[in-house]
Image (tube, rainbow, N blue to C red):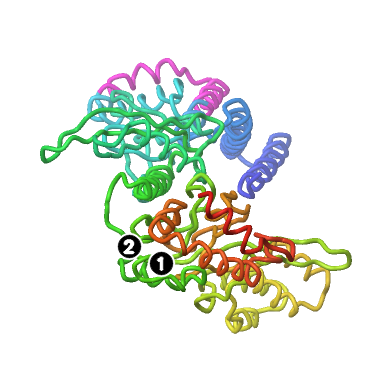
Amino acid sequence: MKTSNLILVGLTGLLLFVYSFLRSNPDLVSNSIVKFLGVAVLICGSIAIVNFLSFIIVNLWFVRFQGKQASDLVKLVVLLFLYGICAIIIFQLFGQDITALFATSALITAVVGFALQSTLGNFFSGVALQIDQPFHIGDRVIIQDDEGSVVSITWRATTIQTREGILVQIPNGLMSEEVVKVIPGQGNIQRSIDFLVSGQVHPQKVIDTVYHAILNQSHPNINLDKPVQVSMWNFELAEESLFINYRIFYYPRNYEAAEQYSDRDILRRVWYALNRHGMNSEDQVASSDQRLRLISSIEFFRNLSPEVHQIILRHATSLLFDTGETLTSYNLPEKTMFIVSQGYVNVQQELRLVPGQTKFQVFTRRPKTHPPIPLERQFVERVAFELAQYIGPTAFSLAHEKRVASLYSLYQQLAEEILDLEQRETFLQSCPAAPLEQLQSGDCFGERSLFFSEPLVRATMITAVETELLAIPQEAIAKVLDHDPRLLDVIAHDFARYQSEYLTKTMQIPGAKSQKAEQIAIAIGNL
């Protein structure tokens, strides 16, 4: 209970005590003063009783049965109703005829009502809205061209806040006359996103590509308990070319954030997926000369002639991935090797539990073409803020001194600054499970998938920035051998040495042994 209400109750009790004392001793003061104190007791008592009943009705009963916070208009109507009852009781206690009061004020009421017709209309429309309750505070509504969350309902207007933060006041009269769309929460409202693709592309291929792109790494705002659908919607003509309009249907968990965040992120992911399958822009990020240099830098392609490199390049494809996209078998073709053209990929090493110690198995032992890129400032600041809770402000300078490329290394190095072992363990709870390796321009993976048709090793691989991969399929190797069958032994011997030096004792070949050149030659010859 508020302090003002407690003071009011105390004042009422004090006035009641004084009134009772003076009434039992009429000789002390005049009768008019006693009547005045009686009126004061009734008024203060009425206010205290009204505040108490209003609190019970609005803050307890309404919230319990409606599950929503009561609007200002509900509070106003309840207060007016309770004060009206108290006024009638007070008039009757003093022997006043209230019917005469109503009769004499009828003309005044008519004049005031005519003058305040619009204002009273809004008031009674607000009362009607509260009785019908088509929406509550916190609900998202659409009326005319305005969409926002209801923040208040007063006697005159309903206020909604748009996603830009603008407060729009809509008169209650207009709210009761116009069509109001109410958007409930709980992720039960379906939303759609449109995109165009050339009519020359097979519709089912577009639908399958987009569907897998969305579900392979779903956006956190997509409610996966509800179905996600991709459908061909209609045809459009633009500059004498036929396009097909496709529509994505999904249920956002937070409808308010859908248009500004999840819709745009989904369209970005769709664009990159369509680009990888050649369904939109034919432009490639890396130039032909750069891709030739990438191919010639690979150890088992290095001894091949430039003409052979050109053959491999003609059959290679460029795949573009968005920032933060997870690389899996759903968005990477099988039986293919990949070279990072631009950007970089973070690969999480594998945790190996060895008796008495914890070891991490690297993804590849091939020397990296570039030094690791340090963590972005925002990640360092986040870890420093966590560390500051244990060692104070010096955590920020210590964190920025560590030039590391993975969060795991940053957490492990900074944890040594915490002397209390229990606090150190709490700090490390936010640490990633394993270190990260960076694959930058010139680095590669999927070598065994290319030569042995093995599936890609299961590893968490996420693009850190927009990244282009050069995909070399088995067809390219087959064309090379068609051009010069003598290159089979050259590639086999070079790859045998490559495996032994870089892939053994890694996540790709956990053991120390790898295939010999003769076995590799047989596998390549069967491509």
Outermost residue on the right side: it is 356
User: What is the quadrant of residue 387 in the picture?
Assistant: bottom right
How far from the left and from the top, in percent, is residue 222?
Answer: 50, 39
> In the current view of this chain or complex, which residue is farthest to the front?
486
CA–CA distance between discs 1 and 2? 8 Å
Q: Which of 284 and 228 is in front in this view?
A: 284
Main SS of the magenta part reads helix
Q: In the structure shown, which secondary structural element does the residue marked by tag 2 occupy?
A: loop
* Magenta segment boundaries in residue numbering: 82-110
184 shown above or below 466: above
Relative height, residue 272 to residue 349 (above, below): above
Q: Residues within 10 Å of mark 2 (few under 14, many from 20)?
A: some
Residue of label 2 = 285
Q: Disc 1 residue type? A: Gln
Total count of labels: 2
| Element type at mark 1 | strand
Q: Name the residue under label 1.
A: 342
Image coordinates of residue 358 in percent, x first then y, are 80, 66
Tell me which amino acid carries mark 2.
Val
Q: Position of residue 325 (x, y in %)?
A: 48, 54
Is 37 within the magenta? no
Taking the spot 69% from the left edge, 39% from the top edge, the residue there is 22
